[in-house]
Structures are given as C-alpha cells and as structure tokens.
C-alpha cells in the first residue's frame, strides 16, 4: 500500500483544512485526517474520473478533539491510470480544499523463474548405468588379458618342459640322436652273436657316453 495522504484540520484556525496541492499514488492508500482542535465533521469525495477506478471507504467522518483517523481509498482497477480531484470539506462546507490526485497503474512484474535444484544433480540411474558400463568393461579387459596370459603361459610352459628335462648344454636333436644310436646298438648286440660286433657296440656306446659328458661340461 502507498503512503497515506495527510489532511490537517483545525490547525491554523477553526474549521481550517490543509492539504497538498497534488499527489500521486500507485494502488490503494489511506487518507489520514488529523484534528488539531475541537470536534469537527469532515467530508471526503472523489470526482467522477477517480470514482471510475477507485472508491472511498466512507465519505463522512466525525472527529473528536485531537483525533486521528485513517480513511481507506480502495483502487479497484490498478491496471489503468487516472487523474482527478479529491475534495475535502470541514463543518459541512465551512471550508473546502481540493487535491489533484493521480492514480498510477501498477506495472505487472514478471515472476522469477525458479529452477528445481534436483535438475542440477545427476540422476542416480544414470550414475549407476555409467558405473556398470565402466566396471563391466574393466572386468572384460582384465579377464581377456588374463586369458591371453594363460594361453601364452601355457605355450611357454609346454615348450620349456622338454628343455628343462634335458641336461644343460645338450639340445633336443642331439639327445634324440644319442638315444636312437644307443637303441640300435643294443638291438644289434642282442640279434647278432658276434664278439666283434659286440665289441664295436660297446665302443660306440662308450663314444656316445663320452660325447654326452663333454657336452655337459
């Protein structure tokens, strides 16, 4: 509500009325009557132009000595402006004053745009979805790399099994040749009953053993 419009009665002399020459108000407001002397009757009235958009709560008022009374002026159409005259009379017209009154239209204000705080926070479902994708990819990557390591490890272990079974310094082909030669010598000894062949077989066997011993050094 706008500031009140002050009217002083009986301040300078009996039945005197003091008002501002002109005022401007926006929306409803009060006419504040101040009686500075003896009891007095005060009349307030809006002209036709102002009455089209506003009205006075009561037009006739009896003021006791020293009384202060507020008279509401209700603006019914605050979406339009109007300019007219407010009449104030004391003691049934003994003294009358007029106020040039301008009623300004209320400018509509845009309501503030409220942003829901929940919109600024990430959705829990989206967070869980991203977390599941990341963890699933990690598990797949780790399991994949583990499988590769297992497969490569299997090949390495199978290859190193034969090599670890051989004496140091003796490769697989040489060992196979020695075993085959030894086997043939034993078969020949068993199959041929000859002292010369038997002696040759032992000599050959001794050579193989000596070669293996040298290769181990």
Image (cartoon, helix red, strand yellow):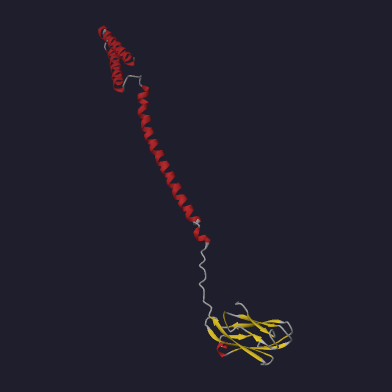
For residue 174, above or below residue 68? above
Residue 68 appears in the rendering: yes
The quarter of the displayed image where residue 176 is located: top left
Residue placed at 37% from the left, 34% from the top?
Answer: 152
Residue placed at 29% from the left, 22% from the top?
Answer: 173
Give percent across and percent down for residue 172: 31, 23
Question: From the viewer's perspective, is 35 left or right of 126?
Answer: right
Give percent across and percent down for residue 10: 70, 85
Classify the position of the C terminus by image quarter. top left
What number of labels is visible? Answer: 0
Q: Quick one: which residue is furthest to the front in this view?
A: 12
The quarter of the displayed image where residue 179 is located: top left
Q: Nearer the viewer, residue 181 or 165?
A: 165
Give percent across and percent down for residue 181: 28, 17
Residue placed at 46% from the left, 50% from the top?
Answer: 132
Residue placed at 27% from the left, 8% from the top?
Answer: 199
Q: Quick one: which residue is furthest to the bottom in this view?
A: 93
Q: Nearer the viewer, residue 121 or 134?
A: 121
For residue 206, above or below residue 43? above
Q: Quick one: which residue is furthest to the top in this view?
A: 195
Give percent across and percent down for residue 41: 70, 89
Residue 77 appears in the rendering: no
For residue 30, above or below residue 112? below
Classify the position of the N terminus by image quarter. bottom right
Question: From the viewer's perspective, is 130 left or right of 14?
Answer: left
Question: From the viewer's perspective, is 15 left or right of 186?
Answer: right
Q: Nearer the viewer, residue 77 or 176?
A: 77
């Amino acid at each position: 509500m706008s500031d009140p419009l002050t009217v002083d009665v009986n301040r300078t002399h009996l039945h005197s009325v003091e008002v501002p020459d002109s005022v401007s108000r926006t929306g409803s407001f009060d006419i504040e009557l101040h009686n500075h002397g003896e009891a007095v009757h005060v009349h307030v009235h809006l002209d036709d132009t102002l009455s089209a958009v506003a009205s006075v709560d009561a037009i006739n008022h009896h003021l006791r000595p020293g009384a202060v009374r507020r008279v509401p002026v209700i603006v019914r159409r605050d979406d339009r402006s109007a300019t007219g005259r407010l009449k104030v009379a004391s003691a049934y017209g003994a003294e009358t004053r007029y106020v040039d009154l301008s009623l300004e239209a209320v400018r509509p204000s845009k309501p503030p745009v409220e942003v829901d705080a929940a919109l600024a926070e990430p959705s829990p479902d989206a967070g869980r979805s991203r977390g599941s994708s990341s963890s699933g990819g990690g598990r797949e990557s780790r399991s994949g790399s583990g499988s590769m390591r297992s497969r490569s490890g299997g090949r390495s272990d199978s290859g190193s099994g034969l090599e670890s079974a051989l004496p140091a310094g003796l490769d697989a082909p040489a060992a196979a040749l020695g075993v085959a030669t030894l086997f043939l010598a034993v078969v020949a000894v068993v199959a041929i009953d000859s002292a010369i062949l038997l002696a040759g077989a032992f000599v050959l066997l001794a050579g193989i053993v000596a070669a293996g011993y040298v290769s181990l050094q």
